Amino acid sequence: MQKSLSSLMIALAFASATAPQAHAASNEDVVKRHFASLVAGPTPKTSELQMFLTMMPKGGDLHHHYSGAIYAEQYLEWVDKQGFCVNKTDFRINTAAGAKSASCVSGKDLVADNAAYRALLQKWSTADFYNHSSGKQLPPDQTFFDTFGYFNDVASTNGSEGLQTLKKRAIAENLSYIETIYEIAPITPDGDFDKLAAEGFDNARLNAALEALVPKLEASQAFQQGIQNYLAHLQKASAGVDDEQFTMRYQPFVLRFLPPSMVFSQMLASFKLAKTSPQIVGVNIVGQESLNVSMRDYSLHMQMFKFLKAKYPDVKMALHAGELALGVVPPEGLKFHIQEAVNVAGANRIGHGIDIAHESNALAIMKTMRERRIPVEVNLTSNEFILGVKGPAHPLDLYRKYGVPFVISTDDAGVTRHNLSNEYVLFATRYKTDYAEVKKLSYDSIRYSFLADADKKRLLQQLDSRFSKFEADIARALLPAK
Protein backbone atom coordinates (compact mmCIF):
# COMPACT_ATOMS: atom_id res chain seq x y z
CA MET A 1 0.00 0.00 0.00
CA GLN A 2 2.79 2.41 0.95
CA LYS A 3 4.63 1.60 -2.29
CA SER A 4 1.45 2.21 -4.36
CA LEU A 5 0.86 5.53 -2.61
CA SER A 6 4.45 6.65 -3.22
CA SER A 7 4.21 5.68 -6.89
CA LEU A 8 0.96 7.65 -7.21
CA MET A 9 2.48 10.74 -5.64
CA ILE A 10 5.48 10.53 -7.99
CA ALA A 11 3.18 10.12 -10.98
CA LEU A 12 1.06 13.11 -9.92
CA ALA A 13 4.14 15.21 -9.39
CA PHE A 14 5.45 14.27 -12.83
CA ALA A 15 2.09 15.01 -14.43
CA SER A 16 1.93 18.35 -12.70
CA ALA A 17 5.41 19.25 -13.90
CA THR A 18 4.78 18.26 -17.51
CA ALA A 19 1.11 19.20 -18.02
CA PRO A 20 0.04 22.62 -19.36
CA GLN A 21 -0.28 25.22 -16.60
CA ALA A 22 -4.07 25.37 -16.61
CA HIS A 23 -4.18 27.34 -13.39
CA ALA A 24 -1.39 29.78 -14.19
CA ALA A 25 -2.34 33.41 -13.62
CA SER A 26 -3.93 35.01 -16.67
CA ASN A 27 -2.52 38.23 -18.03
CA GLU A 28 -5.55 40.03 -16.65
CA ASP A 29 -4.89 38.59 -13.17
CA VAL A 30 -1.30 39.77 -13.31
CA VAL A 31 -2.43 43.26 -14.32
CA LYS A 32 -5.06 43.32 -11.57
CA ARG A 33 -2.44 42.58 -8.94
CA HIS A 34 -0.05 45.11 -10.39
CA PHE A 35 -2.70 47.84 -10.43
CA ALA A 36 -3.63 47.00 -6.83
CA SER A 37 0.00 47.49 -5.84
CA LEU A 38 0.02 50.91 -7.49
CA VAL A 39 -2.99 52.21 -5.57
CA ALA A 40 -2.30 50.44 -2.26
CA GLY A 41 -1.27 52.25 0.87
CA PRO A 42 -1.63 55.87 1.91
CA THR A 43 0.36 57.19 -1.06
CA PRO A 44 -0.46 55.82 -4.52
CA LYS A 45 2.43 55.45 -6.96
CA THR A 46 1.33 58.36 -9.11
CA SER A 47 4.08 58.40 -11.73
CA GLU A 48 3.73 54.68 -12.43
CA LEU A 49 -0.05 55.05 -12.50
CA GLN A 50 0.40 57.81 -15.07
CA MET A 51 2.43 55.48 -17.29
CA PHE A 52 0.02 52.58 -16.76
CA LEU A 53 -3.10 54.61 -17.50
CA THR A 54 -1.54 56.34 -20.50
CA MET A 55 -0.77 52.92 -21.96
CA MET A 56 -4.18 51.50 -21.04
CA PRO A 57 -6.80 51.49 -23.82
CA LYS A 58 -9.44 54.13 -23.20
CA GLY A 59 -12.66 53.78 -25.11
CA GLY A 60 -14.08 57.27 -25.47
CA ASP A 61 -14.17 60.83 -24.17
CA LEU A 62 -17.85 61.71 -23.98
CA HIS A 63 -17.71 65.20 -22.44
CA HIS A 64 -15.34 67.04 -24.74
CA HIS A 65 -15.53 70.63 -25.97
CA TYR A 66 -13.72 71.11 -29.27
CA SER A 67 -12.74 74.76 -28.76
CA GLY A 68 -11.71 74.11 -25.16
CA ALA A 69 -9.62 71.09 -26.17
CA ILE A 70 -7.29 73.03 -28.48
CA TYR A 71 -4.20 74.35 -26.69
CA ALA A 72 -3.38 78.07 -26.78
CA GLU A 73 -0.18 77.34 -28.69
CA GLN A 74 -2.18 76.08 -31.67
CA TYR A 75 -4.54 79.02 -31.56
CA LEU A 76 -1.53 81.33 -31.84
CA GLU A 77 -0.46 79.47 -34.99
CA TRP A 78 -3.92 80.09 -36.42
CA VAL A 79 -3.66 83.78 -35.58
CA ASP A 80 -0.73 83.91 -37.98
CA LYS A 81 -2.46 81.79 -40.62
CA GLN A 82 -5.36 84.24 -40.63
CA GLY A 83 -3.08 87.29 -40.71
CA PHE A 84 -4.38 88.55 -37.35
CA CYS A 85 -2.41 89.92 -34.42
CA VAL A 86 -2.60 89.75 -30.62
CA ASN A 87 -2.60 92.86 -28.46
CA LYS A 88 0.22 92.60 -25.92
CA THR A 89 -1.71 94.68 -23.38
CA ASP A 90 -5.02 92.81 -23.11
CA PHE A 91 -4.14 89.69 -25.19
CA ARG A 92 -7.19 90.06 -27.39
CA ILE A 93 -7.03 89.05 -31.05
CA ASN A 94 -7.35 91.92 -33.52
CA THR A 95 -8.81 90.70 -36.83
CA ALA A 96 -8.60 94.02 -38.66
CA ALA A 97 -6.39 94.19 -41.74
CA GLY A 98 -3.18 96.13 -41.15
CA ALA A 99 -3.59 96.09 -37.37
CA LYS A 100 -0.09 94.79 -36.65
CA SER A 101 2.07 97.21 -34.67
CA ALA A 102 4.53 97.26 -31.81
CA SER A 103 1.65 96.52 -29.43
CA CYS A 104 -0.32 94.13 -31.68
CA VAL A 105 1.99 91.36 -32.82
CA SER A 106 1.91 88.05 -34.63
CA GLY A 107 1.61 84.83 -32.71
CA LYS A 108 5.19 83.97 -33.62
CA ASP A 109 6.49 87.28 -32.29
CA LEU A 110 4.44 86.97 -29.12
CA VAL A 111 5.86 83.51 -28.43
CA ALA A 112 9.36 84.95 -28.81
CA ASP A 113 8.63 87.38 -25.96
CA ASN A 114 8.82 85.09 -22.93
CA ALA A 115 7.07 87.46 -20.52
CA ALA A 116 4.22 88.22 -22.92
CA TYR A 117 3.87 84.56 -23.87
CA ARG A 118 3.58 83.49 -20.24
CA ALA A 119 1.05 86.23 -19.57
CA LEU A 120 -0.99 85.13 -22.59
CA LEU A 121 -1.11 81.53 -21.35
CA GLN A 122 -2.52 82.82 -18.07
CA LYS A 123 -5.33 84.52 -20.02
CA TRP A 124 -5.99 81.88 -22.69
CA SER A 125 -5.84 78.93 -20.26
CA THR A 126 -5.62 78.16 -16.55
CA ALA A 127 -1.80 77.92 -16.69
CA ASP A 128 -0.03 79.05 -13.51
CA PHE A 129 -3.26 79.78 -11.65
CA TYR A 130 -2.24 77.91 -8.51
CA ASN A 131 1.51 78.47 -8.65
CA HIS A 132 1.33 82.16 -9.44
CA SER A 133 -0.63 84.99 -7.90
CA SER A 134 -1.07 88.63 -8.70
CA GLY A 135 -3.42 91.43 -7.83
CA LYS A 136 -5.02 91.04 -11.26
CA GLN A 137 -5.95 87.38 -10.84
CA LEU A 138 -9.66 86.70 -11.29
CA PRO A 139 -11.69 84.01 -9.47
CA PRO A 140 -11.15 80.53 -10.96
CA ASP A 141 -14.59 80.16 -12.53
CA GLN A 142 -14.31 83.55 -14.23
CA THR A 143 -10.75 82.76 -15.32
CA PHE A 144 -11.96 79.53 -16.92
CA PHE A 145 -15.00 80.88 -18.75
CA ASP A 146 -13.22 84.06 -19.86
CA THR A 147 -10.62 82.06 -21.80
CA PHE A 148 -13.07 81.33 -24.62
CA GLY A 149 -13.48 85.02 -25.38
CA TYR A 150 -9.76 85.37 -26.05
CA PHE A 151 -9.38 82.67 -28.70
CA ASN A 152 -12.92 82.65 -30.07
CA ASP A 153 -11.93 84.55 -33.24
CA VAL A 154 -9.80 81.63 -34.42
CA ALA A 155 -11.65 78.74 -32.77
CA SER A 156 -13.62 77.94 -35.94
CA THR A 157 -11.16 78.93 -38.64
CA ASN A 158 -9.11 75.74 -38.99
CA GLY A 159 -11.48 72.91 -38.13
CA SER A 160 -9.72 70.22 -40.18
CA GLU A 161 -6.33 70.91 -38.61
CA GLY A 162 -7.87 71.13 -35.15
CA LEU A 163 -9.70 67.82 -35.42
CA GLN A 164 -6.60 66.11 -36.81
CA THR A 165 -4.57 67.45 -33.89
CA LEU A 166 -7.11 66.09 -31.41
CA LYS A 167 -7.13 62.75 -33.21
CA LYS A 168 -3.34 62.48 -33.13
CA ARG A 169 -3.26 63.40 -29.44
CA ALA A 170 -6.01 60.89 -28.65
CA ILE A 171 -4.27 58.01 -30.42
CA ALA A 172 -1.05 58.86 -28.55
CA GLU A 173 -2.82 58.15 -25.27
CA ASN A 174 -4.66 55.08 -26.60
CA LEU A 175 -8.07 56.70 -26.95
CA SER A 176 -10.21 55.49 -29.83
CA TYR A 177 -13.32 57.71 -29.74
CA ILE A 178 -14.22 61.33 -29.05
CA GLU A 179 -17.75 62.68 -28.95
CA THR A 180 -17.03 66.36 -29.19
CA ILE A 181 -19.27 69.34 -28.56
CA TYR A 182 -18.45 71.03 -31.83
CA GLU A 183 -19.43 74.52 -32.92
CA ILE A 184 -22.34 76.64 -31.76
CA ALA A 185 -25.68 75.80 -33.34
CA PRO A 186 -27.12 78.38 -35.77
CA ILE A 187 -28.93 81.30 -34.11
CA THR A 188 -32.14 82.89 -35.43
CA PRO A 189 -33.62 85.49 -33.04
CA ASP A 190 -37.33 86.27 -32.80
CA GLY A 191 -38.33 89.45 -30.98
CA ASP A 192 -42.01 88.52 -30.69
CA PHE A 193 -41.20 85.32 -28.80
CA ASP A 194 -38.82 87.16 -26.48
CA LYS A 195 -41.60 89.64 -25.61
CA LEU A 196 -43.89 86.74 -24.69
CA ALA A 197 -41.13 85.15 -22.64
CA ALA A 198 -40.63 88.39 -20.71
CA GLU A 199 -44.30 88.29 -19.73
CA GLY A 200 -43.91 84.73 -18.44
CA PHE A 201 -45.21 81.34 -19.60
CA ASP A 202 -47.29 78.65 -18.09
CA ASN A 203 -46.83 75.28 -19.79
CA ALA A 204 -49.87 75.59 -22.05
CA ARG A 205 -48.93 79.09 -23.18
CA LEU A 206 -45.33 78.04 -23.73
CA ASN A 207 -46.31 75.05 -25.87
CA ALA A 208 -48.63 77.22 -27.95
CA ALA A 209 -45.87 79.80 -28.45
CA LEU A 210 -43.36 77.11 -29.43
CA GLU A 211 -45.84 75.50 -31.85
CA ALA A 212 -46.16 78.89 -33.53
CA LEU A 213 -42.42 79.57 -33.52
CA VAL A 214 -41.35 76.28 -35.13
CA PRO A 215 -42.96 76.85 -38.57
CA LYS A 216 -41.83 80.49 -38.44
CA LEU A 217 -38.24 79.38 -38.02
CA GLU A 218 -38.58 76.62 -40.60
CA ALA A 219 -39.79 79.21 -43.11
CA SER A 220 -36.82 81.46 -42.37
CA GLN A 221 -34.16 81.48 -45.06
CA ALA A 222 -31.57 82.48 -42.44
CA PHE A 223 -32.52 79.49 -40.25
CA GLN A 224 -32.30 77.02 -43.13
CA GLN A 225 -29.05 78.55 -44.40
CA GLY A 226 -27.55 78.27 -40.92
CA ILE A 227 -28.23 74.54 -40.89
CA GLN A 228 -26.74 74.06 -44.34
CA ASN A 229 -23.66 76.11 -43.43
CA TYR A 230 -23.15 74.05 -40.28
CA LEU A 231 -23.34 70.78 -42.21
CA ALA A 232 -20.96 72.00 -44.90
CA HIS A 233 -18.45 73.21 -42.32
CA LEU A 234 -18.59 69.93 -40.40
CA GLN A 235 -18.26 67.78 -43.50
CA LYS A 236 -15.22 69.72 -44.67
CA ALA A 237 -13.52 69.81 -41.26
CA SER A 238 -14.15 66.14 -40.45
CA ALA A 239 -13.00 64.70 -43.78
CA GLY A 240 -10.37 62.03 -43.16
CA VAL A 241 -10.76 61.99 -39.38
CA ASP A 242 -12.38 58.57 -39.06
CA ASP A 243 -10.32 55.45 -39.78
CA GLU A 244 -9.66 52.00 -38.33
CA GLN A 245 -7.85 53.45 -35.32
CA PHE A 246 -10.09 56.34 -34.44
CA THR A 247 -13.69 57.59 -34.63
CA MET A 248 -15.17 61.00 -33.89
CA ARG A 249 -18.78 62.13 -33.61
CA TYR A 250 -20.26 65.56 -32.99
CA GLN A 251 -22.80 67.51 -30.95
CA PRO A 252 -23.89 71.05 -31.86
CA PHE A 253 -24.30 73.19 -28.76
CA VAL A 254 -26.77 75.73 -27.44
CA LEU A 255 -25.64 78.71 -25.33
CA ARG A 256 -27.87 78.88 -22.28
CA PHE A 257 -27.31 82.55 -21.40
CA LEU A 258 -28.76 84.00 -24.63
CA PRO A 259 -32.32 85.39 -25.04
CA PRO A 260 -35.04 82.69 -25.12
CA SER A 261 -35.75 82.88 -28.86
CA MET A 262 -32.07 82.44 -29.67
CA VAL A 263 -31.83 79.49 -27.30
CA PHE A 264 -34.84 77.77 -28.83
CA SER A 265 -33.71 78.43 -32.40
CA GLN A 266 -30.40 76.78 -31.54
CA MET A 267 -32.19 73.81 -29.99
CA LEU A 268 -34.43 73.33 -33.02
CA ALA A 269 -31.48 73.65 -35.39
CA SER A 270 -29.54 71.11 -33.30
CA PHE A 271 -32.34 68.54 -33.39
CA LYS A 272 -32.69 68.99 -37.15
CA LEU A 273 -28.94 68.64 -37.62
CA ALA A 274 -28.95 65.41 -35.61
CA LYS A 275 -31.74 64.02 -37.78
CA THR A 276 -29.94 65.05 -40.98
CA SER A 277 -26.36 63.87 -40.44
CA PRO A 278 -25.21 60.52 -38.99
CA GLN A 279 -22.05 62.30 -37.82
CA ILE A 280 -24.14 64.42 -35.43
CA VAL A 281 -25.19 62.06 -32.67
CA GLY A 282 -26.71 64.34 -30.05
CA VAL A 283 -27.42 67.85 -28.82
CA ASN A 284 -26.15 69.76 -25.81
CA ILE A 285 -26.57 72.98 -23.87
CA VAL A 286 -23.50 74.73 -22.49
CA GLY A 287 -22.37 77.92 -20.79
CA GLN A 288 -21.82 78.99 -17.22
CA GLU A 289 -24.78 77.62 -15.29
CA SER A 290 -24.51 80.11 -12.44
CA LEU A 291 -25.03 83.23 -14.57
CA ASN A 292 -28.22 85.19 -13.92
CA VAL A 293 -29.87 84.38 -17.26
CA SER A 294 -28.81 80.72 -17.07
CA MET A 295 -30.44 80.39 -13.66
CA ARG A 296 -33.52 82.47 -14.53
CA ASP A 297 -34.31 80.53 -17.70
CA TYR A 298 -33.19 77.05 -16.63
CA SER A 299 -36.70 75.60 -16.22
CA LEU A 300 -37.80 77.28 -19.45
CA HIS A 301 -34.92 75.61 -21.28
CA MET A 302 -35.85 72.19 -19.91
CA GLN A 303 -39.44 72.67 -21.08
CA MET A 304 -38.13 73.62 -24.52
CA PHE A 305 -36.09 70.42 -24.64
CA LYS A 306 -39.16 68.43 -23.57
CA PHE A 307 -41.16 70.01 -26.41
CA LEU A 308 -38.53 69.13 -29.02
CA LYS A 309 -37.81 65.67 -27.62
CA ALA A 310 -41.48 64.81 -28.20
CA LYS A 311 -41.07 65.78 -31.85
CA TYR A 312 -37.67 64.12 -32.26
CA PRO A 313 -37.75 61.16 -29.85
CA ASP A 314 -34.72 59.43 -31.42
CA VAL A 315 -32.34 62.37 -30.93
CA LYS A 316 -30.04 61.96 -27.92
CA MET A 317 -29.33 64.70 -25.39
CA ALA A 318 -26.30 65.12 -23.13
CA LEU A 319 -27.13 68.13 -20.97
CA HIS A 320 -24.83 70.13 -18.72
CA ALA A 321 -26.73 70.14 -15.44
CA GLY A 322 -25.85 70.73 -11.82
CA GLU A 323 -22.44 72.31 -12.50
CA LEU A 324 -23.00 74.27 -9.30
CA ALA A 325 -21.74 74.20 -5.72
CA LEU A 326 -22.89 75.61 -2.40
CA GLY A 327 -22.24 79.33 -2.28
CA VAL A 328 -22.00 79.77 -6.06
CA VAL A 329 -25.74 80.47 -6.19
CA PRO A 330 -28.38 80.79 -3.43
CA PRO A 331 -29.31 77.41 -1.87
CA GLU A 332 -32.64 77.14 -3.70
CA GLY A 333 -30.72 77.27 -7.00
CA LEU A 334 -29.18 73.89 -6.18
CA LYS A 335 -32.49 72.08 -5.72
CA PHE A 336 -33.76 71.15 -9.17
CA HIS A 337 -31.33 71.29 -12.11
CA ILE A 338 -30.46 67.61 -12.41
CA GLN A 339 -34.02 66.56 -11.66
CA GLU A 340 -35.43 68.73 -14.44
CA ALA A 341 -32.74 67.67 -16.92
CA VAL A 342 -33.67 64.03 -16.27
CA ASN A 343 -37.42 64.12 -15.68
CA VAL A 344 -38.52 67.13 -17.72
CA ALA A 345 -36.06 67.40 -20.61
CA GLY A 346 -35.42 63.65 -20.84
CA ALA A 347 -31.62 63.82 -20.90
CA ASN A 348 -29.75 60.66 -21.91
CA ARG A 349 -26.56 61.74 -20.13
CA ILE A 350 -25.81 64.37 -17.49
CA GLY A 351 -22.73 66.56 -17.74
CA HIS A 352 -21.05 67.29 -14.37
CA GLY A 353 -23.97 66.64 -11.97
CA ILE A 354 -22.08 68.22 -9.05
CA ASP A 355 -25.01 69.54 -7.00
CA ILE A 356 -26.84 66.20 -6.63
CA ALA A 357 -26.49 66.11 -2.82
CA HIS A 358 -28.40 69.40 -2.61
CA GLU A 359 -31.27 68.41 -4.92
CA SER A 360 -34.72 68.18 -3.32
CA ASN A 361 -35.23 64.55 -4.36
CA ALA A 362 -31.66 63.33 -4.63
CA LEU A 363 -32.38 59.67 -3.85
CA ALA A 364 -35.31 59.52 -6.28
CA ILE A 365 -33.26 61.18 -9.01
CA MET A 366 -30.39 58.74 -8.57
CA LYS A 367 -32.84 55.83 -8.58
CA THR A 368 -34.24 57.06 -11.88
CA MET A 369 -30.77 57.53 -13.33
CA ARG A 370 -29.77 54.03 -12.21
CA GLU A 371 -32.90 52.43 -13.66
CA ARG A 372 -32.81 54.34 -16.93
CA ARG A 373 -29.02 53.94 -17.21
CA ILE A 374 -28.42 57.69 -17.45
CA PRO A 375 -24.71 58.19 -16.77
CA VAL A 376 -22.92 61.18 -15.31
CA GLU A 377 -20.01 62.61 -17.28
CA VAL A 378 -17.40 63.15 -14.55
CA ASN A 379 -14.84 65.89 -15.19
CA LEU A 380 -12.53 65.90 -12.18
CA THR A 381 -10.06 68.58 -13.29
CA SER A 382 -12.63 71.18 -14.32
CA ASN A 383 -14.87 70.43 -11.32
CA GLU A 384 -11.93 71.15 -9.06
CA PHE A 385 -10.82 74.27 -10.89
CA ILE A 386 -14.18 75.91 -11.60
CA LEU A 387 -16.09 74.94 -8.45
CA GLY A 388 -13.36 73.96 -6.00
CA VAL A 389 -14.97 70.51 -5.64
CA LYS A 390 -12.64 67.52 -5.35
CA GLY A 391 -11.90 64.37 -3.35
CA PRO A 392 -14.64 63.35 -0.89
CA ALA A 393 -16.54 66.59 -1.57
CA HIS A 394 -17.11 65.44 -5.15
CA PRO A 395 -20.35 63.42 -5.51
CA LEU A 396 -18.63 60.64 -7.45
CA ASP A 397 -18.77 58.22 -4.52
CA LEU A 398 -22.41 59.16 -3.98
CA TYR A 399 -23.24 58.17 -7.54
CA ARG A 400 -21.23 54.96 -7.14
CA LYS A 401 -23.00 54.06 -3.88
CA TYR A 402 -26.44 54.37 -5.47
CA GLY A 403 -25.54 52.58 -8.68
CA VAL A 404 -25.65 55.56 -11.04
CA PRO A 405 -23.41 54.86 -14.04
CA PHE A 406 -20.65 57.32 -14.82
CA VAL A 407 -17.85 57.90 -17.30
CA ILE A 408 -14.54 59.74 -16.96
CA SER A 409 -14.07 62.63 -19.38
CA THR A 410 -11.96 65.75 -19.96
CA ASP A 411 -14.31 68.71 -20.50
CA ASP A 412 -11.83 71.34 -21.80
CA ALA A 413 -8.37 69.79 -21.81
CA GLY A 414 -6.75 72.65 -23.72
CA VAL A 415 -7.96 75.27 -21.27
CA THR A 416 -7.06 73.29 -18.14
CA ARG A 417 -4.01 71.75 -19.86
CA HIS A 418 -4.41 68.05 -19.13
CA ASN A 419 -5.63 64.91 -20.92
CA LEU A 420 -7.94 61.93 -20.42
CA SER A 421 -5.19 59.73 -18.99
CA ASN A 422 -4.67 62.29 -16.25
CA GLU A 423 -8.38 62.18 -15.41
CA TYR A 424 -8.06 58.43 -14.88
CA VAL A 425 -5.02 59.07 -12.68
CA LEU A 426 -7.03 61.50 -10.55
CA PHE A 427 -9.79 58.92 -10.23
CA ALA A 428 -7.37 56.14 -9.27
CA THR A 429 -5.48 58.24 -6.71
CA ARG A 430 -8.45 59.97 -5.09
CA TYR A 431 -11.03 57.18 -4.93
CA LYS A 432 -10.80 53.58 -3.80
CA THR A 433 -10.90 51.53 -6.97
CA ASP A 434 -9.45 48.46 -8.68
CA TYR A 435 -8.45 47.43 -12.15
CA ALA A 436 -11.83 45.84 -12.89
CA GLU A 437 -13.64 49.14 -12.32
CA VAL A 438 -11.13 51.17 -14.31
CA LYS A 439 -11.36 48.71 -17.18
CA LYS A 440 -15.16 48.83 -17.02
CA LEU A 441 -15.06 52.62 -17.22
CA SER A 442 -13.18 52.34 -20.49
CA TYR A 443 -15.84 50.03 -21.91
CA ASP A 444 -18.67 52.15 -20.48
CA SER A 445 -17.36 55.17 -22.36
CA ILE A 446 -18.31 53.31 -25.54
CA ARG A 447 -21.46 51.67 -24.17
CA TYR A 448 -22.91 55.04 -23.10
CA SER A 449 -21.83 56.89 -26.22
CA PHE A 450 -24.40 58.06 -28.73
CA LEU A 451 -22.79 56.04 -31.50
CA ALA A 452 -24.90 53.98 -33.88
CA ASP A 453 -25.19 50.37 -32.74
CA ALA A 454 -22.92 49.04 -35.51
CA ASP A 455 -20.19 51.54 -34.64
CA LYS A 456 -20.55 50.81 -30.95
CA LYS A 457 -20.21 47.07 -31.56
CA ARG A 458 -17.14 47.66 -33.75
CA LEU A 459 -15.37 49.80 -31.14
CA LEU A 460 -16.20 47.40 -28.31
CA GLN A 461 -14.72 44.51 -30.29
CA GLN A 462 -11.61 46.59 -30.96
CA LEU A 463 -11.42 47.38 -27.26
CA ASP A 464 -11.38 43.64 -26.51
CA SER A 465 -8.35 43.20 -28.75
CA ARG A 466 -6.61 46.30 -27.44
CA PHE A 467 -7.03 45.23 -23.81
CA SER A 468 -5.79 41.74 -24.62
CA LYS A 469 -2.61 43.19 -26.08
CA PHE A 470 -2.22 45.73 -23.26
CA GLU A 471 -2.55 43.07 -20.56
CA ALA A 472 -0.13 40.77 -22.35
CA ASP A 473 2.41 43.59 -22.64
CA ILE A 474 2.10 44.52 -18.96
CA ALA A 475 2.30 40.88 -17.84
CA ARG A 476 5.36 40.30 -20.02
CA ALA A 477 7.07 43.32 -18.51
CA LEU A 478 6.28 42.23 -14.94
CA LEU A 479 6.93 38.50 -15.06
CA PRO A 480 10.54 37.24 -14.96
CA ALA A 481 11.95 36.18 -18.30
CA LYS A 482 11.83 32.40 -18.97
Image (tube, rainbow, N blue to C red):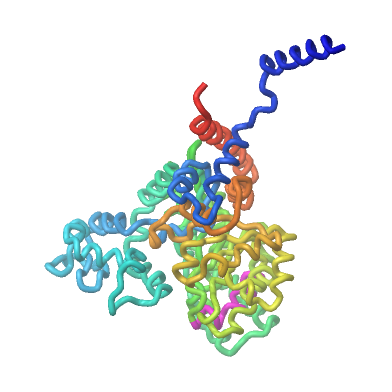
Q: Position of residue 354 (x, y in %)?
A: 57, 69
Instruction: Locate residue 403: give its quadrant.
Output: bottom right
Q: Residue at x 56, y 64 (%)?
A: 351
Q: Is residue 306 magenta?
A: yes
Depth check, front residue: 192 or 392: 392
Q: Residue at x 67, y 14 (%)?
A: 18
Examine the rendering and report whether any part of residue 410 can be seen. yes
Depth check, front residue: 170 or 331: 331
- Magenta range is 292-307
- Tell whether 47 sits left or right of 402: left
Q: Position of residue 375 (x, y in %)?
A: 64, 59
- Tell whether 416 sits left or right of 339: left
Residue extending furthest toward the bottom: 199
Q: Position of residue 99 (x, y in %)?
A: 17, 67
Q: Is residue 343 magenta?
A: no
Depth check, front residue: 75 or 409: 409
Q: Is residue 407 above or below residue 58?
A: below
Residue extending furthest toward the left: 102
Q: Is residue 460 above or below residue 155?
A: above
Q: Residue at x 47, y 52 (%)?
A: 420
The quadrant of the rendering that contains the N terminus is top right
Depth check, front residue: 219 or 248: 248
- Chief secondary structure of the magenta span? helix
Q: Position of residue 143 (x, y in %)?
A: 37, 72
Instruction: Locate residue 136: give its quadrant.
Output: bottom left
